[in-house]
Image (tube, rainbow, N blue to C red):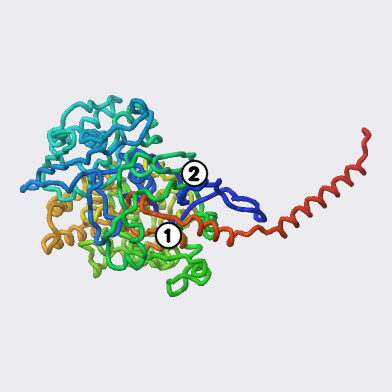
Amino acid sequence: MLCKVLALGLGGSVLAVGPAGCSNDPYPPAEGKKVLYAALGEDPHGLDPVQAGDTLSGGIVAQIYDSLYEYHYLKRPYELKPCLAASMPQVSDDGLTYTIPVKQGVRFQDDPCFAGGTGREVTAEDFVYSIKRLMDMGNEPRGSWLLKGKVVGLDAWYDESVERAAAGRKMDYGRPIEGLNALDRYTLQFKLTEPFQQLKYALEMSYTAAVPREAVEYYGEDFVNHPVGTGPFRLKEWRKRWKLILERNPTYRDDRYPSEGEPGDAEAGLFEAAGMRLPIVDEVHNTIIGEAQPAWILFKQGYLEGSGISKDHFEEAITPEKELTQEFMRKGVSLTKFPEMVVYYVAFNMEDPVVGANKALRQAMSLAYDTEWRIEHFANGRAISAQGPIPPGMFGYAPDLRNPYKQYDVERARQRLAEAGYPGGVGPDGKRLEITYDIGSAEPAARQSALAFARDMGEIGIQVKVVTNTWAEFLKKTIDRRLQVFSVGWILDYPDPENFLQLLYGPNKAPGPNRSNYDNPEFNRLFEQMKAMEDGPERLAIIKRMVDIVVEDAPWIPSIHTVSYILRHRWVGNAKAHAMTGGYLKYRDVDVELRQRLRREWNRPNYWSLTAILGVLLAMAMILAVFRRAAPTGGP
């Protein structure tokens, strides 16, 4: 799943939360409700599951919609379990037929789109409809790559949708697809074109969540702002650039907090809610915050439950030994550190006539890219240099890999640039080479990263033009293949190296996840061989060959793999780090009384400063009155 390249931690901007001398609580009274307070760096791109292709949008959609499967909240290694499915898939001996029973009695949330406003029961046919939507280009889906080439007859549906979308015509959703069927009201069946062991993971993702046809037809183009799901929460209010509030779905199915996990969970208090009905909190208030500083202040005051740590605030919270400072320990703040299954990279658009057609140019730019400087100055040491597409902890990761074009060397970069036809950065036409570098945010950290890229390329004579976009504009440009060079990240969707290698698979070019539009026939052939294999020596050998091809072709500059640092206040319960995007807020708890008491202690009204301000205002008023009495009243 795509993610932004920003500082490690929160971005954001918020309006002033009140006079410094008075109460600074930015929220209205919760009236006895359990409310979780969080921050979003910006508004979601939208809340249609088929369009939730980035971590921000996907994180909200996963609270509102359910899929057939979900990850167990506490178990590690990560383990799938039924969500809207009644059991794990029944798979035929040849691996080509998956039969899935659907839970009975689950209902969509109440909504005006349904007769009488009452949500109806979910059936197998809802998944047939939802997957057709995912493969209909008229819906601008972000996840069609998941099932493309996998299900009998589904590619023909997709290809027809491309033609119809271009002509402004809609698909006929009553048309059957051979490999996608509701055998009866509660039984779904897939017939595959080839074995695809990752199908169960695909059916966990929000792309394949159950969507009611009534809602899509009732809201039309505005469906993206009116989610209607079966999940633990529903959308209560969304005021763009201000706040997005979720509330408990009163018709949510009987779902319980787990009683199993891994060693250490009991000691961490993670079983105290075992058996409790979900969700535990009543509402989730997300404030849209556009810069790091105001969000950091709100966290320290106790008005946000948790926070990442931006580079500018790292030393305030973390010691040189990478532990919490005394200030945060005294407040009872907890620190969680875990390696993220993510790769951040600079992508070259391989269809661009300049960078795409010149391998030596890409290699030169990679040699000029100073990763270690970025780790020190942007990540505060919370990352390792990426040498290829697969992150640590994933099968296929090679800790001893040394990408020859990822070893920072300005002199080698200049030599390679000359071999590319640009000695000193000047082309055959006598003009200096200019590269356009797009970023997906105006947040200071994104701009700083872009300036660092321009500085690195300037060292070898390349001029960089930085273009700033909103995240939505940036995504649209990548989909339309209109970028030349850009930075982005990919967070694990499911625990299989295929999820990272498919970012470079030719048939997955934009609008699929291969936003660099890289297309190497040998890599593609090896990918098709590798994807259906079980982990083992043979699969590992193929993955090594694939990585070697990518290293030499340099469609990316692999940047970093990060380690996440998460801060949480002591009143937040049942919090466990999870590598996958999912609907995990249903498990969270909050001690409202403790939070309120500590907020009052940390934010005592400063009556002396308020008195001083009032005194100054009174004095100014008296002086103004004297001047008014002294002023002439006649005309000229």
Depicted 119 relative to depicted 349: above or below: above
Query: Callout 2, which amino acid?
Result: Lys
Image coordinates for residue 297, horizontal then vertical, percent: 55, 58
Task: State the separation of the CA atoms marked 1 and 2.
Answer: 22 Å
Judge the density around disc 1: few (<14), some (14-19), many (≥20) Cα neighbours within 10 Å.
many
Image coordinates for residue 45, horizontal then vertical, percent: 40, 41
Viewer-side residue, 102 vs 137: 102
| Residue at x 11%, y 42% (from the top left corner) | 193
Rendering quarter of residue 608 = bottom right
Rendering quarter of residue 566 = bottom left
Image coordinates for residue 372, horizontal then vertical, percent: 38, 67
| Residue at x 67%, y 59% (from the top left corner) | 606
> Residues at badges 1 and 2 in contact (C-beta under 8 Å)?
no
Residue at mark 1: 8
Viewer-side residue, 33 vs 172: 33
Q: Quadrant of the C terminus?
A: top right
Query: Callout 1, which amino acid?
Result: Leu
Depicted 132 relative to depicted 116: above or below: below
Q: Quick check: 12 left or right of 93?
A: right
**Please, which residue is most extreme toward the left here?**
93
Residue at mark 2: 243
From this viewpoint, is residue 454 visible?
A: no
Depicted 74 relative to depicted 44: above or below: below
